[in-house]
Image (tube, helix red, strand yellow):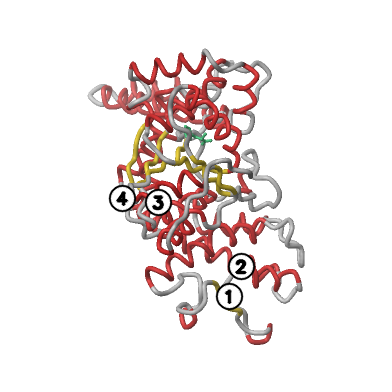
Amino acid sequence: MADNSKQVHLNNEQNQRFNLITRSLHEVLGADIVKQKISTGEQLKCYWGTAPTGRPHVGYFVPLVKIADFLRAGVEVKVLMADIHAFLDNLKAPFELVQDRVKYYTKLLRSIFISLDVPVDNLIFVVGSSYQLTPQYSMDSYRLAAMTTEHDAKKAGAEVVKQVSSPLLSGMLYPGLQALDEEHLGCDFQFGGVDQRKIFVMAESLLPKLGYAKRAHLMNAMVPGLAGGKMSSSDPNSKIDFLDSAADVKKKIKLAFCEEGNVQENGLLAFLKAVVLPIAAYKQLIKGASPFAAQDAANDFLFSVTRPERFGGSLHYKDYDKIEHDFSTKALHPGDLKKAVEDAINTLLDPIRKDFEADEEFKAVEKAAYPPPIDPAAAAKEAKKAKNEAKKNKTKASAATFQQQSVDSVADQVERVEIPKQ
Ligand SMILES: N[C@@H](Cc1ccc(O)cc1)C(=O)O
C-alpha cells in the first residue's frame, strides 16, 4: 500500500527490530510510524484488544505468538479486555456476565502466555471500562459521533460487529470507540487480525480529525477452522477450546477435512503454519529445542511426523514449506498428518489444562463466565428428581415423626401412598 510519509532510515540493529516486529504479518499500515519511533530510540508502545464474548479457541495462539515477538523487540504491550465493546456488540452478553468473562479471559490468557514462555510481567492488562467511563473519553465519543456518518460506522464494523436486520446504535459506536482506544491507551500501533482492517482504516482518518495522532496498524492473517474453509462459530467441531480434553481433540481432528494432496483447503496445514511452527521456532530460540519434534531431532528440527519404518520412517521438518510440499506430493499421508497435529495440539494444551485443574479460582471463574446451557428437557428431569427427592425426604421425616406412634398408623401412611386412586 502506498505510504506518503517520508522515508525513515534505520541502522542495522534498528532494522532487525523492525523486522522482528513486522515479520509474518499479513499487512502493515503506517510502517513509517513504527520506523520513526525505532529511529529515535523512544519506547515503542502497542496494544491488542479482545472483546470477551465467546470462549477463546486455539486460533488465539496466532496473535499471542506475535505478541511474543513484540516483547522480544522491546515493545510495551497492553492487552485490552474490551468489556464495553463486548456489551456494545449486539449485547452478545449482559454487562454483568461480561465481567465474569473478563476474569476468565484474563486467567486464560495469562496461562497461555506462561505456557508459551512469554514473560507475563512485561504485559499490561487493561480493562476497557477502567478508562472508557471517564469524562474525557465520554466527550471524545460524543465528538466522534458528531463527525461519523451512519454509513461509515456501519461499513467500518461490517466484519467485526454482528450483522443483524435492525442494527443497534451500540454496534455503530463500536468502531469509533475502538479508534479512540488508540489515543486513550497511548499506543503507537494497534495490533489485530485482518478482520479489523476496516476499523483500523477508519481510525487512521478519524483520530487526526479529533486532533490526535494517526497510529500504525499491524495485522495478522486469520486462521481457517479445522474443518477447512471459513471458521464457523456455529460448528463446534471446527474449533478446539483451550480446555478441550485429549479425547475432544482427537474427535475434532478426526472430523477435520484433510484430503490427500489438497493443500488449499486444509485447516490442519493452516494451523501448523500459523501456530505450531512459529511456536516451535520461538521455543527453539529460547529453550534450544522444539517441543513438536522427535526428541533426538528437536535441536535441529521444528516438527516431526512419526511413522513406522514400513511406511517410510519418521519425517522431520525445519519449515512449513517442506511440510506443504510433502503433503501436496502425497509423500505425507493425511492420517499421519492428523496424528502429528493432534499430538502438537495436546502438547500445546497440556500445561493450560493442568493450570486450570490445579486452580480452584480458575475453575469457578470459568463456570461463572460460561454457565452450562439450560436444556429444557434436562431441567424438567432435574426438577422431577428434586421433587421426588423432597417427597422421599418428607416420607422419611414423617416416618421419623411417627416412630413413637403405633406401627399400625405408620403402615396406614405407607398404604395411603401406595394404593393408587381409582
Ligand atoms: N474488535 C476487537 C476487540 C477490540 C475492541 C476494542 C479495541 O479497542 C480493540 C479491540 C475484536 O473483534 O475482538
Quarter assignment of residue 159: top right
Residue type pointed to by label 3: Ile
Q: Is residue 383 visible?
A: no
Residue drawn at x 30%, y 45% as measured from the top left: 360
The mark found on residue 320 in the picture is 2
Question: Disc 4, disc 2: CB below 8 Å?
Answer: no
Q: Residue at x 52, y 12 (%)?
A: 146
Q: Are marks 1 and 2 in contact (CB under 8 Å)?
A: yes
Disc 3 and disc 4 in contact, CB within 8 angstroms: no
**Residue 243 at x, y = what percent?**
46, 50
Indicate which disc residue 317 carries: 1
Q: Position of residue 299 (x, y in %)?
A: 45, 79
Residues 348 and 202: in front is 202
Residue 45 location (% of width, % of height): 37, 44
- Residue at image mark 4: 122
Callout 4 amino acid: Asn
Could you tell me which secondary element the residue under label 2 belongs to? helix
Residue shown at 33%/47% (left/top)? 42
First in sequence: mark 3 or mark 4?
Answer: 3
Kind of element beneath mark 4: helix
User: Is residue 239 at least partly visible in the picture?
Assistant: yes
Mark with earlier residue (3, 1): 3
Label 4 to label 2: alpha-carbon separation: 30 Å
